[in-house]
Image (cartoon, coloured by chain):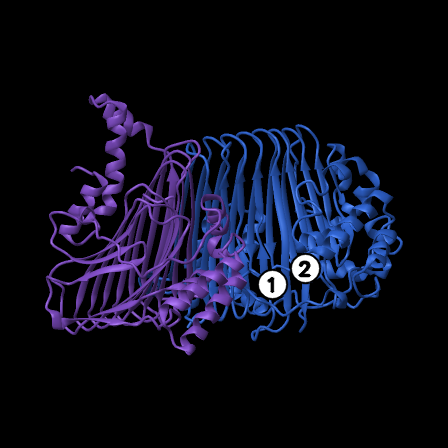
Amino acid sequence: MKEQLQKDFDNIVKNLNLSQKDIEIKKFYLDNFINKGFPNRREEDWKFSDLNQIIKKDIGELSFYSDYTHTNKVDTSVFVDGLEHNKIVFINGRIEKIDFDYEQKEKIEIIDQSENINKSNNNSLSDLNNAFTNKSFKILVKNGYQLTKPLIIYHTTNSKIWSKNINLRLEFELDKNSSLRLIDLFSDTSEKNFLNIFYNFDLKENAVLKNYKVDRFDNKNIKYSFNNIEQDKNSISETFILSAGSNFFKNEINCNLNGKYSSAFVNGIFSLNNNKHHEIRTIINHLTENTKSYQLIKSVIEDSAKAVYQGKIFVNSDAQKTDGYQLSKAILLNKDSEFNAKPELEIYADDVKCSHGSASGSLNEDSIFYLMSRGLNYQQSRELLINGFLLDVVEKITDSEIKNLIKNLIGIKE
Amino acid sequence: MDNRQKEIENLKDYKYGFSTDIENTRAPKGLNEDVIKFISNIKKEPQWMLEFRLKAFERFKLLKEPDWQKPKYPKIDYQDLYYYSAPKSMDDKPKSLDELDPKLLETYKKLGIPLQEQARLNGIAVDAVFDSVSVATTFREELSKLGIIFCPISEAIQNHPELVKKYLGSVIPTTDHFFATLNSAVFTDGSFAYIPEGVRCPMELSTYFRINASNTGQFERTLIVADKGSYVSYLEGCTAPMRDENQLHAANVELIALDDAEIKYSTVQNWYPGDKDGKGGIYNFVTKRGLCKGKNSKISWTQVETGSAITWKYPSCILKGDNSVGEFYSIAITNNHQKADTGTKMIHLGKNTKSKIISKGISAGFSDMTYRGLVDISPKASNSNNYTQCDSLLMGNKCGAHTVPYIKNKNSESNIAHEATTSKISEEQLHYCQQRGLNAEEAVGLIVNGFCKEVLQQLPMEFAVEAQKLVGISLEGSVG
């Protein structure tokens, strides 16, 4: 893999037209990655999902270079109907379109900051991302501006790429009293690629971020996404994850509640079948007084699929009056399905209310019997129960437009 | 009231902190094959036992000390320890208690453990382990009438080699982790109990561990085998003198329950916790593992952990037999600079296996407490159930309480439920108690005892009273 990395790196550098200093920085991260390699089960955070093995098994040899000099045609058929929205379109990792048609131009600034590096995470995937990211932008929502329409980021890949690693990075800054609704929509027609995505959100006072990550459509790609969220006083972040389509997907949320009265919500659904293996890992750091976090993760696991939830609530000794809650529930539908959880509390302050719960088991046969005795057949009863189980999480979505969109995507009827 | 006050006053500091001035026989300092041969030789062990030890030592040389635990400690120099220390008077084994060195009898009397015949009214058979040797085992004849073997493990190696050979290392193999392997190589003494088929052991068996000599590591090994349909309740207590240095205690405890057998293992651990500034104290790195080998067997661990500078142990159950049951009840209290990383592992292998974990953690002062546990239901363990509850109580904002459960469910017909909470003692409860005339300290004591009740109930009577007192003492000075 080392030769491949070196070769691809040289190609990237040649095409990017970077200063000597930037090349040095990128080189530094490349060397870091070469040293560490892909994360494996020996690392505590990857205990349940050995990415190194998964890449070896599902992809085999990976290459790291894509030619970004040519534009791709934007396939408008993937765009969401019936919901007016702003767009950012990635095709095969290349930004093809940034479009804020519905917003006041002077309130949003898009800054090219490809030379910046990401420091919020120090795993080897972050090094990989820093070494290979081609273009990266910062989207700044200015003081007091609330976007009228949601922003949808389309992550599309097509069959032109194969066995490739794609690295993306985006940064968002929400100034005081601003708000942003953001949907990440994944749609892939490619196979056997590894997407490595890093987002950084900086929420100033009273800012509101709603991020919905939707991986609905079946595909044979491997994905890793890392969200770092910094929150100032009174800010709110809401993250919803629908984890269903890819062969492997690990979503990581790292949230730092730096300001008083800030709050973070993370809700997630795993809906997995076949051999899929998905993971959500959250770290909520309560760093000051009167902060709040709430997490709800529900999983329905079929066939020999595997879901993993690792959630951590950290409470600093200054963070009195913290309210932290975490619940994960899983239904295992098949003999070979597997659910692993590691709900963790690390607490250094005494005046706190923190709890977690985790339960996993089979579908309740009594409930099925109840429904069948009222005339539904087995299949219908099962669907009804599963829908009800998952609806609980969807109902947590605070934006009604997007809630409906997601209900449609999952196929939940009320 | 006065009495109670006086009692608390007496117990305020670590009351077992005295040391006994007694002449010792020691192995040469350090860890090497010669020391292992020395231990084996002085215990007059058969060749197979020496081989067992040397095999473990070979393995030990390849292992690296683990470092994933929460409480960090300064590096231990394993060459700077004595691996064997025994009172000189034990060189020629005394035939009966009358021949026992009076100093030893005195020590145990001070500790509240009656070894002499006349004091044996409380009906508990005791095996007293002093540093590296077992000094006395009581009630042996009475037990042997029922076919129960209860003796120091060094005697069992000589008198019952077929049992020891069969079961020793069958639950904790010599190739296990760092400390367990070290123990396999250098273990000195400990208790052995065998309960024959269908026998219900009429009294509590108990071992009392005492570390006396300085600079010594205590490595004892306990092996309990409950044959088909038998029942035994086993108690374990520990103390050590106050010293400025840290002493290592790395024991291995193996339990084996065959068909329909039940083992109840209770520990009240009160090793010297170090002084108020965190100086000295015992490193309690113990491996305890029970194997529910037969159908319908049951193993239940109950522990009250109040002592030690660092407690690092996970009493576990391997539920291999169908319908077997594993239980774990724990109270862990840390105060001042104590640290604890404790919990359990429930490994479900057989069908219809059940496990229950109740863990209560209390941290005060500058201490740090972690519950770390694993529930693993394997694909073959259909219809299995686990229920876990871990509650933590924090007193003050200089201490920490952490929960790290690992939950693995690989069987769709099995259910796992896990709950955990962390909070402080509510103002309302305190106010309520104080309003009724209790002072702050008493109120906290009452509430904490209520918090721990679920676990204290699991202890045998004599222990429960002592444990309840210990809970109060350990938290002394942490209020206000």
Front residue (pair A399, B233): A399
* Residue A340: image location, x then y, percent: 43, 45
Q: Are marks 1 and 2 in contact (CB under 8 Å)?
A: yes
Q: Quadrant of the C terminus of chain B?
A: bottom left
Q: Count how many numbered circles sit on residues in the image.
A: 2
Label annotation for residue B308: 1
Q: Is residue A200 visible?
A: yes
Q: Amino acid at mark 2?
A: His
Front residue (pair B440, B49): B49
* Residue B72: image location, x then y, percent: 57, 66
Label annotation for residue B249: 2
Which color is chain A depicted in?
purple
* Residue B360: image location, x then y, percent: 46, 54
From this view, report whether residue A41 is shown above or below residue B27. Answer: above
The reply, left or right, for residue B324 in relation to residue A370 is right
Q: Chain of mark 1?
A: B
Q: Amino acid at mark 1?
A: Ser
Secondary element under disc 2, as helix, strand or loop, is strand
Question: Which numbered disc, 1 or 2, marks the residue that appears first in the sequence?
Answer: 2
Q: Which chain is blue?
A: B
Front residue (pair A3, A384): A3
Task: Give the residue drawn at x 59%, y 63%.
Answer: B310
Which quarter of the picture shows residue A142?
Answer: bottom left
